[in-house]
Image (cartoon, rainbow, N blue to C red):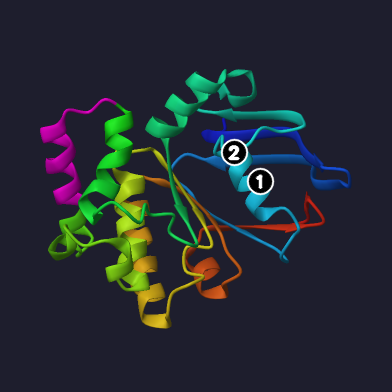
Amino acid sequence: MSDAIIRTDKLGKVYDGGFRTVALSDVDLLIDRGSFSCIMGPSGHGKSTLLHLIGGLDRPTTGEVIVKEENLSAMGPERLAEFRNRTVGFVFQFFNLIAVLSVLENVQVAMMIAGVSEKEQRDRAVRLLEMLDVKEKLDARPNQLSGGQRQRVAVARALANDPEILMMDEPTGNLDSRSEAELLDLIGELHKQGKTIVVVSHSDTVAARAGRIVQIRDGRIVA
């Protein structure tokens, strides 16, 4: 019996802004709880679109996304936002940190939205930043950090509400080789702790750490 935490059924996404683009077509995918999957393929072939759909950041044109036995396609905007905030942590290639906030405040944002008390927000954020070796940067702004430090803060923010699933879109794309290795070691530790990891990447180094590689081409899973 499958222990899938994420399931897609005939998933499709079409963008039509005057020029129709089929980003995904008939994607059936199972991702098991506690697994580490890497989604690979050429640029523009649907990798990030798939990640955004299974994470609830976008809605499919056809098909369904089932996460923890809940149909994301059937959720209203408020329920979907709550689901994302508590169940999925996102890490992006360009970090997406809020420039006017400190490192501490950037990590606290997700907990603030979830209604966590101010004291618990700070305590949890400090613990995460300490675990990720950036505690000394609590009061710094994102532009005062190195790329590797910014990505660690982004990971801390993604973990703030202790999500079961961590989704990463090219998380090492802007990192040097040392920072990439450090981030991959961290991802490996999170996987050992039981997190379900889904990473979109072009990097063979990233793929080598994953337990499963999903190859996408022309909007379809080919391997």
Q: Which residues are magenta?
A: 115-128
Where is residue 159, by image quadrant?
top left
x and y percentages locating residue 151 in the rendered image: 37, 63
Mark sitting on residue 54? 2
> Is the C terminus in the top left, top right, bottom left or bottom right quadrant?
bottom right
Using residue 98 as the reference point, say whether residue 170 is left or right of it: right
Q: Nearer the viewer, residue 86 or 122?
A: 122
Extreme-front residue of the structure? 100
Cα separation between marks 1 and 2? 6 Å
Does residue 69 sit above or below 202 in this rendering?
above
105 relative position to 89: left or right: left
Mark 1 — residue? Answer: 50
User: Does 149 sit above or below residue 5?
Assistant: below
| Residue 25 placement (x, y as % from top left) | 81, 42
Q: Residue 150 versus residue 29: which sits nearer the camera?
A: 150
How many labels sit on residues?
2
Q: Residue flagged by tag 2: what amino acid is it? A: Ile
Image location of residue 158, percent across then percent down = 36, 47
> Which quadrant of the figure has residue 37?
bottom right
